[in-house]
Amino acid sequence: MKKTFKLTHPKIKYARLVDTVRRDVKRYLKRERSKELPEGFDIWDFDCKFGPSAEAAEVISVAEIGTAINTAEERQLESFYIEILARASHRTGKA
């Protein structure tokens, strides 16, 4: 998913647009995690970027997506860019 979300609409309130973005991201992650893994891999990992535009996007983890959306909401941004790319990976043991 590489997408710029617009948070302005003449009839839909800002908070509802932000909720829609959260739902879309959550649905995308669930859909990607349910796909069958290639042989030899045991988990889906995600490479994520977030920012006000594609050029200014910074690398974040999947766990930080919600916080990044909250920050964009607090700043009342009119749009932001999010990139989530799934890749097959191996589990790492706890240290």
Image: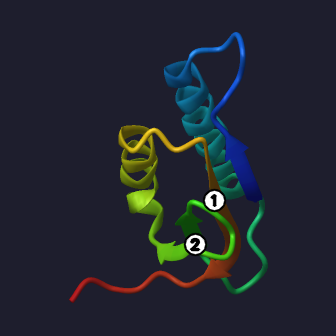
Q: Report the front residue among 31 and 62.
A: 62
Specify the label residue 4 is tagged with.
Answer: none
Q: Residue at x 26, y 83 (%)?
A: 94
Query: Residue 22 lies in what quarter of the image?
Result: top right
Find disc 1 in the rendering and name its residue.
82
Q: Residues within 10 Å of mark 1 (few under 14, many from 20)?
A: many
**Residue 54 point in image, percent of width and height:** 69, 69
Q: Report the front residue among 1 and 58.
A: 58
**Residue 44 point in image, percent of width and height:** 62, 70
Q: State the residue lying farthest toward the left.
A: 95
> Does residue 9 lie above or below 33 as drawn?
above
Q: Residue at x 65, y 58 (%)?
A: 81
**Residue 95 point in image, percent of width and height:** 21, 89
Find disc 2 in the rendering and name its residue.
57
Query: Residue 7 lies in what quarter of the image?
Result: top right
**Residue 47 point in image, percent of width and height:** 60, 75
